[in-house]
Structure formats: C-alpha cells, structure tokens
Amino acid sequence: MRIAVVVALSAAVAGCVSSPVDYSASLSQQDPKWASPECQQARTAASDYAAREKEHPGWGFGVLVGPYSMGLVAAAKEHEQQQRRLLARQIHLQCSSQPLPKELDFDPSTYAPKKTNYP
C-alpha cells in the first residue's frame, strides 16, 4: 500500500507538462513554419492525442478498483506525461523556427520502449 501511495505522489509531483494543443497555441502563427503541412500534421496529432487522453478513467478509477491499482494509474499518468513532452517537442520542431526551449531539449530515444530479452 505504501509503495502505491509513494508512486502516485511521485508521479503527481514530477511535474505536469502542459497539453500539446495548448503548447501549439502558444507558438507564433507568424512563423513561416506554422503554415507548413508538417506543422498541420503535428497539430492534428496533438489534437487527436488530447481527445484520446480525455477518455482515460484517471485517478478516480484507481480508487474505485482498489489501492493496488494506484501504481498502474500512476504509471499510466507518467506515460501520458512522456507522450505530452514528445508531442510538444515535435510540434515545436515542426511549427517554430526558434530553438528548442530547455524543457523540450532532450533525447527522444529516452522515452522509447526498452528492448527486453525473455528466456
């Protein structure tokens, strides 16, 4: 039980990444890259992700199922945070001529699934 609570709290404190849709709205529409097909595709992907994210049951579902599911809910929330960062990075690269901000300047392969070898 304690582990689930610690995992849930650490996921909540880890820092929330704003929605990629909100991030795209904060970029300058006067930028020459804004009207590019790549930018439009990135914004559409962010919008689709935002719609899918709203379908998740969230924290309330974990409370209803039981304390052991809190770890699963926390892991799902952490994965959502990673996906938000990746989408915001992609939107910035496709829609802005400005250099990447510090919070988006990371190696995207750090969020790639790790290859595991099963016996």
Image (spheres, rainbow, N blue to C red):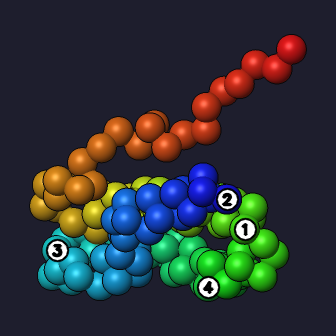
Q: Which amino acid does label 1 sit on?
A: Pro
Instruction: Assign a secondary structure to mark 4.
Output: loop
As drawn, the label of residue 1 is 2
Mark 1 and mark 2 in contact? Answer it, CB < 8 Å: yes
Query: 89 left or right of 49?
Result: left
Instruction: Give the x, y percent position of residue 97.
Output: 16, 61
Q: Disc 2 or 4, which lies upstream in sequence?
A: 2
- Residue in view at x 41 percent, y 77 percent: 19
The residue located at (17%, 53%) in the rendering is 102
Closer to the eye: label 2 or 4: 2
Front position among marks 2 and 3: 2
Q: Which amino acid does label 4 sit on?
A: Lys
Q: Name the residue under label 4.
A: 54
| Left or right, residue 52 beside residue 65 | left
Q: Which residue is drawn at 53% across and 71% down?
A: 45
Residue 37 in view here: no
Cα distance, mark 3 to mark 1?
A: 48 Å
| Residue, far right | 119
Residue 55 in picture, x, y percent from top left? 69, 84
**Number of residues whose C-alpha sits closer than 10 Å to that of mark 1, classed few (under 14), some (14–19) or many (20 or more):** some
- Which circle's residue, 3 or 4, is located before the other in the chain? 3
Name the residue carrying label 3.
Answer: 31
Q: Is residue 2 above or below residue 42?
A: above
Q: Name the residue under label 1.
A: 67
